[in-house]
Amino acid sequence: MAQTIQRAIELIRRSAEHPLSLTEASEVLGVHKSTALRMLQTLEAARFVRKTGVGTYVFGSGLIELSELALGSMDLRQFASAHLRRLQRETGHTVHLAQLTGDEIIYIDKVDSPAFDAVKLPSRVGRAVSIYASAVGKVILAHLPREERDRLLSHVTFERYTDTTFADRASLELELIAVRERGWATDNGEHDAYVMCVAAPIKDTRGRVVAAVSITAIEVIATLPQLEARLPLLLDTAAAISAELGHTSAVTEASAG
């Protein structure tokens, strides 16, 4: 595995220096052309390299996009950090920060509750969460432009994880309308039956929803209505993080107009 990763890195590096032919890739790696081709095709699928019209491979946009996303996530985490930790102290529950990264909703920060539920929650920083069976996923989806939402959901295979999962596009769309109208989302055990969650959107300077913040607990610690009682604190936190990103109420009013 380590050797494969090293070879992939070498191919990406060479493609950044100059157009890379299949023959050169084979020689650089010391492998048969068929093996080099499979590796290049894998990198091409991830947009780490791009095949030109003359059959050579050049540096692709994938790594540039990942770099930009990583920088954006680092900035967001920096701006949000103190607010997330205060929210955890005020509510006593686990707090998550999630962001749309490529085609996935990714947890980019988490402040664990010292209570029993922290041990049982399956979430991890860097892990993708269900785009349709989570509060953070739904609150981000609900505020995306229709074309972007359609593109993301076109790749989704809906599964009924629990009795409360919105397991088809029609029921999900109705839920997203409700989320947009009230300005926050819930997860009533929709992926893991024992996990309850409420989430609110984070907006940037242009009024776009770029992330979500949530409060999460297992049901034996806090029911969904008990988490909903904490919504004022959650919404205040989302507004504070949004303000750190340059969002103002004037931007929201202009967007609505």
Image (cartoon, rainbow, N blue to C red):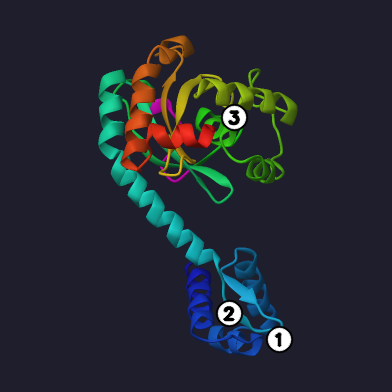
Q: Is residue 149 above or below residue 233?
A: below
**In the rendering, at what x and y percent does residue 129 appear?**
53, 37
Task: Give me the disc on residue 133.
Answer: 3
Percent coordinates x, y for residue 177 in the rendering: 63, 25
Report how far apart the C-alphas of labels 3 and 1 lie in the structure. 44 Å
Q: Residue at x 37, y 16 (%)?
A: 230
Residue at mark 2 to residue at mark 3: CA–CA distance: 38 Å
Tag 1: amino acid: Val
Q: Secondary structure at mark 1?
A: loop
- Residue 146 is situated, as x and y percent measured from the top left of the image, at 66, 40
Dots 3, 1 in contact, CB < 8 A: no
Residue ID for mark 2:
58
Queried whether the magenta region covers residue 121, the answer comes back as yes
Give neighbour class at mark 2: few <14, some 14-19, many 20+ (Cα, 10 Å).
many
Over which residues does the magenta segment extend?
Answer: 119-127
Q: Earlier in the sequence, mark 2 or mark 3?
A: 2
Q: Is residue 123 visible?
A: no
Give the amino acid type for the residue marked by disc 2 in the picture.
Val
Secondary structure mostly taken by the magenta-highlighted segment of the chain: loop
Q: Identify the residue at horizontal 54%, vertical 33% (top origin).
A: 257
Q: Position of residue 170 (x, y in %)?
A: 74, 27
Q: Residues within 10 Å of mark 1 (few under 14, many from 20)?
A: few
Q: Earlier in the sequence, mark 3 or mark 1?
A: 1
Residue 42 in which image quadrant: bottom right
